[in-house]
Image (spheres, rainbow, N blue to C red):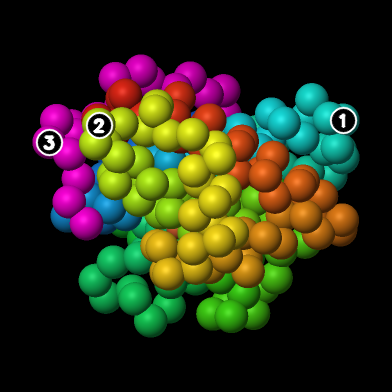
């Protein structure tokens, strides 16, 4: 996939966090997967989606006190593919902590579990709380939304319409065929996120549109 020129891979606005230094994790992801521009952009997009899903559920009063905090959701999105790179392909995403240790960085057990639960077939850990379901369901949706943007004449994410994404998702299974539509569609699971599919797609699209200008999409 060709990305538009002008993509600097450097979000201009630094996200402020309370509990961890986001820039350090950002730099670690950039160094580790930076050669794979797609994985890096996907990491930033999934970070944004995790924030959007958290905010929606919070507004709906659906986040229990046992849920990880918002910063854990964001961090899990940002670093979830940090071990999706040379030497670790076979074990991804089980080696997140090992890769982070190279940069002197650590994560909580909650963040580690969110990441492991986004690939249960590899880790044996299935999503349990809403943070884990959010990463699991949103992971492969960002690619489809990117593809919808890139086939538009302007190639601009901000111009992508929800109806276009929903149509491609539901009615054109060959479009962005690598999208794990069955996983995305589990957002409706009442014991998971319990978010209608169209609303879930809308949350992710809007979240990605918010950061798109910063990453040149
Ligand atoms: Fe991913």
Q: Earlier in the sequence, mark 1 or mark 3?
A: 3
Query: Which labelled disc corresponds to residue 154?
Result: 2
Compared with 197, 140 (above or below) is: below
What is the x, y in percent for residue 146? 37, 46
Query: The residue tagged with tag 1: helix, strand or loop?
Result: loop
Q: Quadrant of residue 114?
A: bottom right
Secondary structure of the magenta portion, mostly? Answer: loop
Q: Residues within 10 Å of mark 3 (few under 14, many from 20)?
A: few
Q: Earlier in the sequence, mark 2 or mark 1?
A: 1
Which residue lies under the disc numbered 1? 61
Q: Residue at x 39, y 28 (%)?
A: 159
Question: For the residue with label 2, is its CB less than 8 Å from the closest atom of ligand 1?
Answer: no
Which residue lies under the disc numbered 3? 5
The residues bearing labels 1 and 3 have C-alpha atoms spaced at a distance of 41 Å
**Which residues fall within the magenta stretch?**
1-19
Q: Quadrant of the C terminus?
A: top left
Q: How many numbered tags mark residues here?
A: 3
Between residues 120 and 96, which one lies in front from this camera angle?
120
């Amino acid at each position: 996939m060709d990305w538009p020129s002008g993509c600097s891979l450097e979000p201009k606005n630094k996200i402020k966090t309370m509990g961890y230094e986001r820039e350090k994790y950002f730099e670690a992801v950039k160094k580790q997967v930076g050669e794979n521009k797609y994985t890096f952009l996907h990491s930033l997009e999934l970070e944004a989606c995790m924030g959007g899903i958290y905010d929606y559920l919070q507004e709906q009063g659906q986040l229990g006190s046992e849920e990880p905090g918002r910063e854990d959701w964001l961090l899990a999105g940002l670093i979830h593919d940090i071990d999706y790179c040379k030497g670790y392909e076979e074990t991804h995403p089980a080696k997140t902590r090992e890769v982070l240790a190279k940069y002197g960085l650590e994560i909580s057990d909650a963040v580690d579990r969110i990441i492991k639960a986004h690939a249960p077939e590899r880790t044996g850990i299935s999503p349990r709380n809403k943070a884990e379901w959010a990463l699991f369901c949103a992971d492969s949706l960002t690619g489809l939304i990117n593809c919808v943007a890139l086939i538009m004449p302007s190639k601009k994410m901000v111009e992508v319409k929800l109806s276009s994404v929903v149509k491609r998702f539901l009615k054109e299974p060959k479009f962005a065929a690598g999208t794990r539509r069955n996983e995305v569609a589990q957002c409706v699971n009442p014991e998971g996120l319990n978010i209608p599919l169209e609303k879930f797609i809308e949350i992710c699209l809007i979240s990605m549109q918010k950061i798109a200008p910063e990453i040149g999409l």
